[in-house]
Amino acid sequence: MPPPPIAAQTIVFDPHLDLPKTAATPGWNGLNDPSSQFDLARAQSGGLTAAAIALFVAQGPRDPASLATAQRDAIARDAAIHAIADGNPTRAALARSPADVRRIVAGHRFAVVESLLNAWPAGDDLDAFDRWYARGVRIVGFVHAGHNQFADSSRLPCSWATERLSMAGCRRSGGRRCSGSTIWAF
């Protein structure tokens, strides 16, 4: 009997998947969503066994009202990522470590790794990272498109993002978060 195909012997991991904007609506669980880059049914039928699913909120103006909206949106996106595992417990589970990924995939379920792309919704609250970590975030990208309070971005496509590079990398709060962080990526 020939050995199984190499893909059947490995963990097939997508390092970045986005959710559709509709993912934060009540009842969404990611099982079948043809409007999305990802749904669990297509991922499994295509042989994808694990993915980092981005908790992403677009960068916006750095004012209190925009930040409050971004924080609400981030909470809703986090809930949507958890809904993939919580709403489909026989098909998926949240992975909080490399060992979790291996265990989940070995059990023929999809391993959901939560990533945070654009830390702007954390505001000036460095403890927000510890709360995100407690919720399951294991990969963090401080910026996406536009500077924020943690780091400078290499691209500024938005009309409001006109400020110049101020730190050419991590800003003071980003550096403090890096120096005090636990393991953020595996």
Image (tube, grey):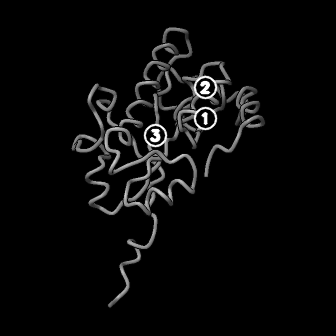
Q: How crowded is mark 2: few (under 14 residues within 10 Å), some or many (20 or more)?
A: many
Seen from the viewer's position, the closer of residues 171 and 17 is 17
Kind of residue sitting beneath label 2: Asn
Q: In this view, does 149 lie to the left or right of 31?
A: right
How dense is the environment of label 3, judged by Cα within 10 Å: few (below 14), some, or many (20 and up)? Answer: many
Specify which label sits upstream in the sequence, 2 or 3: 3
Which residue occupies the foreground of this view, 168 or 86?
A: 86
* Lateral position of residue 174 relative to residue 8, left or right: right
- Horizontally, residue 106 falls left or right of residue 4, namely right
The residue mark sitting in front, 2 or 1, is 1
Question: Which image quadrant is residue 43 in?
Answer: bottom left
Residue at x-position 61% and y-position 35%: 142
Q: Is mark 1 on a helix, strand or loop?
A: loop
Of residue 93 and residue 46, the one placed in the foreground of this image is: 93
Q: Residue at x 46, y 28 (%)?
A: 57
The answer to which quarter of the image holds residue 80 is top left
Q: Name the residue under label 2.
A: 148
| Residue receiving disc 1 | 142
Question: In this orientation, which residue lies closer to the viewer: 27 or 6?
Answer: 27
Label 1 environment density (alpha carbons within 10 Å; few <14, some 14–19, many ≥20):
many
The Cα–Cα distance between marks 2 and 3, rounded to whole angstroms, is 18 Å
Distance of label 2 from label 1 (alpha carbons): 8 Å
Q: Assign a secondary structure to mark 3.
A: strand
Q: What kind of element bears circle 2?
A: loop
Up-down relation of residue 102 to residue 171 (above or below): below
Q: Position of residue 40 (x, y in %)?
A: 30, 49
Residue 126 occupies quadrant:
top right
What residue do we see at 28% from left, 33% from top?
28
Residue type at numbered disc 1: Phe
Mark 3 — residue?
Answer: 54
Whether residues under marks 2 and 1 lie with C-beta atoms below 8 angstroms apart, the answer is: yes
